[in-house]
Amino acid sequence: MSSETLVLSSELSKGTYPDNNGGCFTTDLGQPLIFGSDGYVKITDLAYTPSSWNNVRENSNEITLKMRGYPVWGLVPRTLYHSGEITFERGTRKKYLRNSNRSFRNVDVYRLLIFINSWTKIPHTSEWMPGKPFDINDTNPTPPPIFRTIKEKDLPKNPVNKTPLSIQIQANVAKSNEWQISKCYLPCTYYPLFADFQLAFVNCINDTIEKMFVEAHAHPTIYELPKINLEDFNGFSEAATPPKSVWVFLQEFQWTHWTTVSLIKVAKQFRNATELQIILTPIMEQQLGLINRPRRLGAIPFTLKELRAQERVWTVNPVHKKADRWDPDKPQYFLSYFTDDRWNFDAEGDSVRATYNFYGVNEIDLHRNVVNSLWIFCDIIDGSYVNNVQIPLLQLVPTMQDTGVSFERFGMIHQKRINKSRVDAIKIWISETFDGKPLFFREPVTVSLELQRHV
């Protein structure tokens, strides 16, 4: 039995495998290795940089939003008075048979073109309806045609429009008490600055709110609710265009002269109209310092309480300090009384720009998303059983936290049988769970293997 040591690094073979990183890399061996039926391998050394993985991963990037009670568009019955000129457009549509996505039959469909003002000759067109056109003398067709371009102002009877017709149009319908629930996900990556995380958080939530409104056919009045106006800011690690105004905002709040906590703000009128609830993952709650371990926050309990920020103590002259925080827009008080609607008040005596707020209890630390163990996999070995799943696990090791480069040397360790007779390349990937989904490392990883085989 002969043995030899093989050193693999994520920095090698990048010409062939440009996506190599410390969490998943393939190394070309150059000279292929030939094994018989009894080749074995074991890991002897592992070198990596702790905390060089992404600080937002799939275990911590989910945000749940819940809304209800806001006005939406719906179909309501109305009587339209028109000029008496009606034309029909006929056609056919494919109707697929149940439990089949190939078999279909053609069905007759039609839509209605109607003139409200005979002198303009501009018709309103209904949606397509199954069947054949109804009798033009029938003022109550079943089902009533649906018109999405006709407004309430077009309905009344007048000397020109005398002929009645039962139709359906879009209008503001009763508010629903059923929760509308949607999930959004922050991009999994490493956020070097809080401002980068802040931008991803704000965009994720506000973009999802917009999508929820579209899905629910929200009434246009909901889009007119006041937003939180934001300052111009360009202090992100990469060039980005932040929004000018949002309904939900995350910022740093000066808790003491030297420390900051997170502050999540929601525009008051918007939350009153939508009953918005925001639920973060437990890890994200800890990263933002929203609550002490081991408690769970759940739906964020916003209040109208607004605290006064402490004066910030600068380590350098603030005159020469670049703005490093993205905050809401601050009014120029000597002019804003005449130009800013924040001096207008709602029925409860609050500014129309008032916000619901929630303040964290601990300092922000995006590195609170730790990796407790590393599952190291290799593609040339037989699988091992973990519960009822067979996976090519090479070694499971605990991680070192808050240190520099970690170097692990393994003593007595079980060998793994090699499942190939010829090896031209070896793939190593590292996961934080046994599902085998690779972590992304920003820094290189080096693995040393001991190979054993009969000569």
Image (cartoon, rainbow, N blue to C red):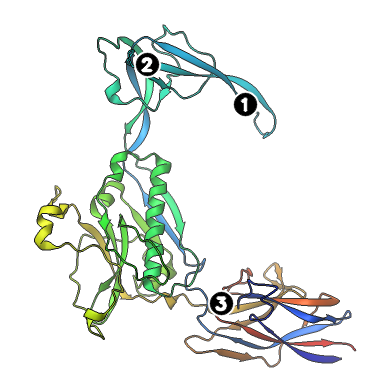
Q: Residue at x 24, y 76 (%)?
A: 255
* Element under disc 1: strand
- Residue 31 in the image: x percent, y percent? 82, 82
Estimate the spatial distance between the alpha carbons at disc 2 and disc 1, rounded to whole Å. Answer: 32 Å
Q: Amino acid at mark 3?
A: Phe
Local packing at callout 2 (Cα closer than 10 Å; few below 14, some 14-19, many 20+) is few
Judged by depth in the image, the label closer to the viewer, 2 or 1, is: 2
85 lies above or below 330: above
Quadrant in the picture for residue 196:
bottom left
Q: Earlier in the sequence, mark 3 or mark 1?
A: 1
User: Which numbered disc covers residue 185?
Assistant: none
Observer able to see residue 391 = yes
Q: Which residue is mark 3?
A: 441
Residue denoted by label 1: 94
Q: Residue type at mark 1?
A: Lys
| Callout 2 touching callout 3 (CB < 8 Å) | no
Residue 231 vertical placement versus 121 (above, below): below
Tell me if residue 437 comes above or below residue 396 in the rendering: above
Q: Quadrant of the N terminus?
A: bottom right
Rendered image: mark on residue 121: 2
Q: Is residue 271 left or right of residue 8?
A: left
